[in-house]
Image (cartoon, grey):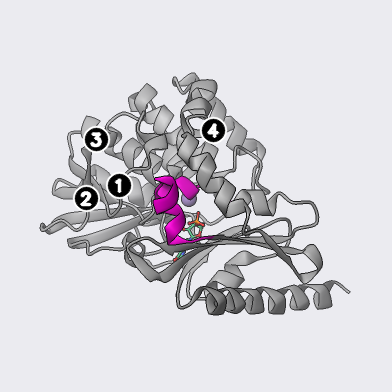
């Protein structure tokens, strides 16, 4: 972390902060917090990502300043937040140097100034620590709110297994700096549109249980979006309905890309010891032990079989090793 601060402190070229495609609260929160802080330090800094901001984050300050990738400019430094590598941006990013601030395992490395800690439950945890160490006084309400959003969303509202007392200390710090937990929760989780519930209704009707009820699957067909007037971002959190079933250890949702129906975006979730990162990796993606993802090309049936085969293999390995 010291090397990250040193690098940024002494840097006076152009900086781009960017995050992964299909951005989430952690990527966006990290980006916004770092942006405002670096602005306060008089740095020449911009933010960008490939996709639009999901509307649940539109209450955050400076959200309108996020540009769209690709950008036809070569930055002196590009800082990737909350992603294992530049490839996760989903679009070209041009820069003379790169830096990565992140909590994903086995990612790309760009220099001694990278700040990577895979034990951190969110990238905003790392950004909070970084900014606190650098200049705590500069952390204002806007920065605290952005950081809190990432902490809240990436920990599943403080429910995941990697929550430690330190995380509540960081949350306390952010609340003291002006983040309002009740307001932020309402903004992020309680502004659903009726259309989203119509979409959920269709998606829940695809629920299937496999492997004696240990695995649950959901499917979002591209037509569902047209039929309900919704977008891909409206599927956020749907997979948790499948994971939340009693007896289910692994759940996945397959989302057909609206502009690219040959491709399925897959989100994998697990409870306890089952490692979905291993499954995602075998399928060409990555992520964390209990939340991972990948993209697979093909027909619905064949893609589903492929995922189920890898899950089944890993379930068998798990049960062999514990017996
Ligand atoms: P989600 O299911 O919410 O899209 O993603 C869950 C986790 O898996 C995130 O940490 C995300 O970075 C990771 N992930 C999702 N899709 C991909 C992918 O296509 N490739 C890689 N390497 N990681 C992914
Ligand atoms: Mn994250």
| Residue at the image point whose x is 63% and y is 57% from the top | 290
Q: What label does residue 64 carry, if any?
A: 3
Q: Disc number at residue 89?
A: none
Label 1 and label 2: CA atoms lie apart by 8 Å
The numbered disc on residue 170 is: 4
Query: Circles 2 and 4: CB distance less than 8 Å?
Result: no
Q: Residues within 10 Å of mark 1 (few under 14, many from 20)?
A: some
Is residue 94 placed above or below 28 in the rendered structure? below
Residue assigned mark 1: 52
Q: Position of residue 126 (x, y in %)?
A: 46, 45
Provide residue 55's location: percent of width, then percent of height.
37, 37
| The one of 178 and 87 positioned closer to us in this rendering | 87
Magenta span includes 235: yes
- Residue 145 appears left or right of 210: left
Q: Earlier in the sequence, mark 1 or mark 2?
A: 1
Residue most extreme to the right: 323
Q: Residue drawn 66% across and 58% down?
A: 207
Proximity of marks 1 and 3: CB atoms separated by less than 8 Å? no
Q: Please, which residue is most extreme toward the front here?
A: 227
Tell me where the magenta segment starts and ends, as one range.
Answer: 220-238
Q: How many neighbours does mark 3 have within 10 angstroms: few (below 14), some (14-19), or many (20 or more)?
A: few
Residue 21: name its quadrant: bottom left
Mark 2 crowdedness (10 Å alpha carbons): few <14, some 14-19, many ≥20? some
**Considering depth in this image, is 222 or 276 the residue closer to the camera?**
222
Q: Quadrant of residue 28?
A: top left
Mark 2 or mark 4: whose residue is earlier in sequence: 2
The residue where tag 2 is placed is 68
């Amino acid at each position: 972390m010291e090397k990250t601060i040193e690098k940024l402190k002494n840097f006076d070229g152009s900086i781009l902060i960017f995050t992964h495609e299909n951005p989430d609260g952690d990527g966006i929160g990290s980006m916004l917090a770092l942006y405002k802080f670096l602005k306060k330090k008089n740095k020449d800094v911009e933010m960008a990502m490939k996709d639009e901001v999901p509307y649940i984050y539109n209450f955050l300050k400076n959200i309108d300043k996020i540009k769209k990738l690709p950008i036809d400019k070569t930055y002196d430094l590009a800082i990737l937040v909350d992603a294992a590598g530049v490839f996760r941006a989903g679009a070209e990013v041009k820069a003379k140097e790169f830096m990565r601030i992140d909590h994903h395992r086995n990612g790309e490395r760009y220099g001694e100034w990278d700040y990577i800690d895979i034990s951190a439950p969110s990238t905003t945890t790392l950004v909070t620590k970084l900014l606190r160490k650098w200049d705590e006084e500069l952390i204002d309400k806007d920065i605290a709110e952005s950081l809190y959003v990432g902490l809240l969303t990436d920990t599943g509202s403080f429910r995941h297994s990697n929550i430690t007392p330190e995380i509540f200390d960081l949350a306390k710090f952010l609340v003291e700096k002006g983040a309002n937990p009740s307001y932020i929760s309402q903004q992020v989780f309680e502004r659903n549109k009726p259309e989203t519930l119509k979409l959920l209704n269709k998606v829940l009707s695809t629920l299937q249980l496999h492997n004696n009820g240990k695995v649950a699957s959901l499917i979002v067909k591209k037509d569902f979006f047209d039929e309900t007037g919704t977008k891909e971002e409206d599927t956020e959190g749907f997979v948790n309905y499948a994971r939340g079933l009693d007896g289910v250890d692994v759940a996945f949702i397959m989302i057909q890309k609206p502009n690219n129906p040959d491709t399925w975006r897959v989100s994998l979730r697990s409870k306890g010891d089952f490692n979905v990162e291993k499954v995602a990796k075998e399928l060409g993606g990555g992520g964390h032990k209990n939340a991972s993802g990948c993209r697979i090309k093909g027909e619905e049936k064949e893609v589903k079989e492929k995922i189920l085969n890898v899950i089944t293999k890993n379930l068998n390995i798990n049960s062999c090793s514990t017996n």
